[in-house]
Amino acid sequence: MIKTDREYKDTKELIRLREEAFIESERDLAARGYTAEQVAKLHEPMRTFHMGMVDDVEYYERLKRGDIGAAQGIRALGKHLIGLRIAAGITQRELARRMDVHESQVSRDEHSDYHGITLGRAESIARALGFALEYHARPRTPGAGLSDVDDLPPLA
C-alpha cells in the first residue's frame, strides 16, 4: 500500500521504468528467437508484480480523490485509517501534530498498518482526521465460510 506522496511518485517512476524495460526485453527475446508465448511466460512473474504496483497507484489515486469506501472487517481497520489520512490530504507529520505524538510514531504505526490498535485509539485517529468511525454488525451469511472467530466459544 502506498502511504505517502513520495512513495506514490517513486512507484509511478518505477512503473514507467519497468514498462520501458519490458518493451526492451520483449524486443531482445524476440530477436533471439523466442515466441510471443515464451516471452509472455518469461515475463509473467514480473508482470504480476508490476500490475500489483499499478493497482497500488490506482488505489492511492482513488483515495486522493476522496473515494475511501468502507473498511471490510476489523482486520482492514489499519489500512482504512491510512486511507482516511490520504483522502483527507493530511501528511503523517500533520497527523502527528494533531495527535500530539512524534511523527516517527505515526510512521511506525502506519508501517505496521496499525497492527494491534485499540478501537479507542482508532477513534482518536479518525477524529484527528475529521472522520467518525461507525460500527455495524450484521447476521452471518450461512455457508459464507469459516474464520478463526468461528472457533471461539459463544459469549455467556
Image (cartoon, rainbow, N blue to C red):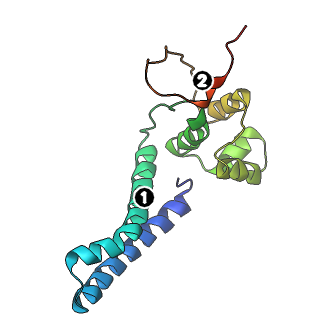
Relative to 61, say whether 114 is above or below: above
Write down the residue under mark 1. Answer: 52
Indicate the quadrant where residue 152 lies.
top right
Mark 2 near mark 1, Cβ–Cβ under 8 Å?
A: no
As shown in the figure, which amino acid type bears the numbered disc 1?
Gly
| Front-lying residue, 30 or 17 | 30
Which comes sooner in the sequence, label 2 or label 1?
A: 1
- Could you tell me residue 58's position as x and y percent? 39, 52
- For the image, the number of numbered tags is 2
Relative to 61, say whether 125 is above or below: above
Q: Taking 6 as reference, is 62 left or right?
A: left
What's the residue at 52%, 55% (across, down)? 2
Q: Taking 100 as reference, is 136 left or right?
A: left
Q: Taking 132 as reference, is 15 left or right?
A: left
Relative to 87, say whether 57 is above or below: below
Q: CA distance from mark 2 to mark 1?
A: 31 Å
The circle drawn on residue 150 is 2
Q: For the residue carrying disc 2, how many other residues have a C-alpha within 10 Å: few (<14), some (14-19), or many (20+)? A: few
- Could you tell me residue 126's position as x and y percent? 62, 32
Relative to 70, say whether 64 is above or below: below
Q: Taking 132 as reference, is 60 left or right?
A: left
What's the residue at 41%, 44% (across, down)? 65
- Could you tell me residue 22's position as x and y percent? 33, 77
Q: Secondary structure at mark 2?
A: helix
| Front-lying residue, 68 or 144 | 144
As shown in the figure, which amino acid type bears the numbered disc 2?
Asp
Q: Quadrant of the C terminus?
A: top right
| Front-lying residue, 96 or 137 | 137
What's the residue at 23%, 91% (across, down)? 31
Q: Secondary structure at mark 1?
A: helix
